Image: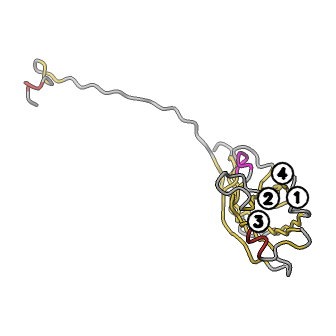
Amino acid sequence: MEPSNGYVVGDGCVFGAEVLVIRSERVNECLRLVGDAASVEHEWTISDISNPDGVLCSEEFDVGNYKWNIVLYPNEDSSVSRNRYLSMFVAPRGIPPHQRVKAEVFISVKTRLNDSVFSKKCTNWFTSSCEEWGYPEFVSTADVSAKSFLVDDCFSVEVGITVQAVVLEAPEI
């Protein structure tokens, strides 16, 4: 070291260090893969779809020890696309805090001939704070009118959900 730099004082050198100790809590989690999970399908027929009273919610159905609903917003509430899309979501109910559920979700709209001609499929992690998950612009209202999705002012939706994995808190080891 060069004495003119001020690091050497007399015949010694002084170094300083700042140490920051972060105390973290240990998180133990257990991942359970659901290898033999069957897809649960639920069909929901909505009557009087052209005159909805706000948000429409299906009856609850069971998938992988959890309750689920299908949620439909008939007039997607965006200033850009108001009344141009149907918004479609799935909503898990009763997932405990500190738990996550990975599920594959398949949502389809059925036609008069009971064909699933419009569908979307994805995988998502659901938590207790995830009130609903899905598509704000699932299908355009123009497609609903043009492609025979309406039968006597009824609209039919089918959802398939497969729980693939569950993460939960594990006991301390």
**Which label number is shown at residue 74?**
2
Please state which amino acid type lies under the numbered disc 4: Gly
Colour setup of the view: secondary structure
Q: Are marks 3 and 2 in contact (CB under 8 Å)?
A: no
Could you tell me how far apart the alpha carbons at marks 3 and 4 are, in whole angstroms? 25 Å
Residue shown at the point (75%, 66%) measured from the top left: 141
**Which label number is shown at residue 54?**
4
The number of callouts visible is: 4
In the displayed image of the protein, which residue is found farthest to the top? Answer: 10
Position of the N terminus, as image quadrant, is top left
The image quadrant of residue 34 is bottom right
Residue shown at the point (71%, 45%) measured from the top left: 129
Please state which amino acid type lies under the numbered disc 1: Asn
Say left or right for 155 vs 23.
right
Classify mark 1: helix, strand or loop. Answer: loop
Could you tell me how far apart the alpha carbons at marks 3 and 1 are, in whole angstroms? 28 Å
In the image, is residue 104 part of the stretch drawn in magenta?
Answer: no
Residue shown at the point (76%, 58%) measured from the top left: 90
Classify mark 2: helix, strand or loop. Answer: loop
Please state which amino acid type lies under the numbered disc 3: Ile
Please state which amino acid type lies under the numbered disc 2: Pro
Write down the region rendered in magenta. 127-131
The image quadrant of residue 33 is bottom right
Q: Mark 1 or mark 4: which is in front?
A: 1
